Image (cartoon, helix red, strand yellow):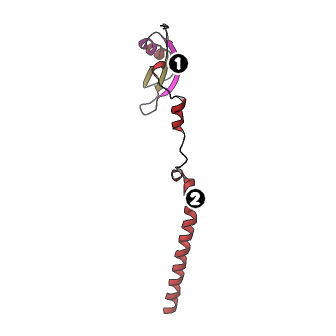
Amino acid sequence: MNETFYHEFEVFSKRTPNAAFTHQFSLLAPNKEMALLMAQENFMRREPVVDIWVVKREDIRGLSPDEKQMLQRLDNKDYRTTKGYGYLKKKWRHYEQQMLDEKEIMSWQGGDSK
């Protein structure tokens, strides 16, 4: 078993209660308690924070190359973007033209009846 004394930890913090956590730095420590203490000493004295996370790097799971392919945007979702509605301008223009024609016809009838 090839185990080392020090482990890599990732430090995250948030500045306000409503802020999102932001990755700050990595550090080496023998255990999570020491990692938290080191993170507080190195980071919290520099800027105010309301919360801090210290996570062992090996406990963070990333995506495999195959899993990353799931993140690609599907091409059949044009209706979710504004460019997917480009035909509506033409359709609305056609609808307005029909309305104008009806109004025009009605005005002719109203003009003749007077």
Tell me the residue at 47%/13% (across/down).
Answer: 38
x 54%, y 51%: residue: 78
| Residue 45 - label | none
Tell me where the magenta segment starts and ends, as one range: 17-35
Q: To which residue does mark 1 refer?
A: 26
Above or below — where is 85 with respect to 4? below
Measuring 44% from the left and 13% from the top, which residue is drawn there? 37
Q: Answer left or right for 25 relative to 31.
A: right
Q: Nearer the viewer, residue 18 or 80?
A: 80
Which of the two marks, 1 or 2, is nearer to us in this view? 2
Q: Helix, strand, or loop for circle 2?
A: loop
Q: CA distance from mark 1 to mark 2?
A: 48 Å
Amino acid type for the residue under numbered disc 1: Ser
Residue carrying label 2? 86
Q: Is residue 74 above or below residue 20?
A: below
Query: Which residue occupies the extreme front position in the image?
Result: 66
Please provide percent x and percent y for residue 91. 55, 66
Residue closest to the eye, 62 or 40: 62
Helix, strand or loop under label 1 = strand
